[in-house]
Image (cartoon, rainbow, N blue to C red):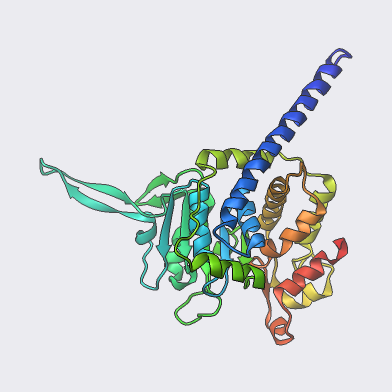
Amino acid sequence: MTLTDAPTTTTTASADAVALAQDIERLGETLAKVRGALGRVIFGQRQVIDETLVTLLAGGHLLLIGVPGLAKTRLVQALGTVLGLDTKRVQFTPDLMPADIIGSEVLEEADGGQRAFRFIKGPVFCQLLMADEINRASPRTQSALLQAMQEHQVSVAGHVHSLPDPFHVLATQNPLEQEGTYPLPEAQLDRFLLQVNVDYPELDAEREMLIATTGAAEAPAVRVMNGTDLIAAQKLVRRLPVGESVLEAILALVRSGRPETSDIDDVKRHVAWGPGPRASQALMLACRARAVLEGRFAPSIDDVLALAPPILRHRMALNFSARADGVTIDGIIQRLCAPYL
């Protein structure tokens, strides 16, 4: 590089930084409208809404767990409307088959007597798939979503069929009704970017909900974005710079959750298996998305700490001694985060 090249390079870098900042500001204004539109339909679940938006901005899938009546299904339906996505719903039941989700081939006969197979697409061919009560289907049916969630395509009879872009799975699960349910396999759990536990709303939020939902009319969800806008937002999220301190914190946090590499006694004694590399990738993307959602130009350690529970809780398992001693996954995650508090 010559001396005359240096100012041009610096000017280009500065222009790129300014353009990135402007794009983040414009996206922040749009996301504020999305929050407002969802807030008029979903009451008292601000953190759940934010973590759901973080998941979609990061391009991932979401697992919502909570007791009945906490608006899990309503949230997914409202998201489909507000984000302008092609949304389909599958009610998972014990008799649901893989073909009921991904589709199947049927034999058709033409007017000339020729027969040929034609693929009929299942409900998975959409932009936002609501997998309602996903743990009520058998493991065989649950596994039908593995390829779709990871590769955004499905294979049927030796042929590969691509899914629409964007493609997201938002699954709901009820923690209380255990009869007739099947535990999700670890491989599928790992494909969910976040596991969000939905709690009861606060008193004021529940009062507002009671008034708003029992009157003559309810406020409808309105569209703010579309699929193209969401794809652009996801690309913008990946452009955010990540500082070395945040990167090191992500690596240290995830690796300290593995019994084989951890220096924490509680992890060595109570964790059966820890988070894999997907947890690090999820934290990196989700921290960027959270920064954009809050109008910041780079993620911080606070983003890592805030997102560690929903990203790690379904990627770790406790052994028998931990359950006998009353140790919980969230307690272990708090222990992992302690050095950064």
Above or below, comparing residue 135 to residue 29 in the picture: below
Which residue is at the far top? Answer: 4
Residue at screen point 37% across, 68% down: 96
Point out the residue furthest to the left here. Answer: 112
Quarter of the image with the N terminus in it: top right
Residue 174 versus residue 184: which sits nearer the camera? Answer: 174
Left or right of residue 102: residue 278: right
Kindly give the residue lying farthest to the front in the view shown.
Answer: 216
Q: Quadrant of the C terminus?
A: bottom right
Q: Quick check: 280 above or below 134?
A: above
Whether residue 63 sits left or right of residue 108 in the image: it is right
**Residue 329, percent from left and from top:** 71, 73
Q: Residue at x 80, y 50 (%)?
A: 300
Between 110 and 67, the one lying in front of the other is 67
Q: Position of residue 15 (x, y in %)?
A: 76, 25
Residue 202 in view (yes/no): no
Q: Position of residue 338 (x, y in %)?
A: 85, 66
Q: Where 286 falls versus 341 (above or below)?
A: above
Going by the picture, which residue comes out furthest to the bottom? Answer: 324
Q: Quadrant of residue 282?
A: bottom right
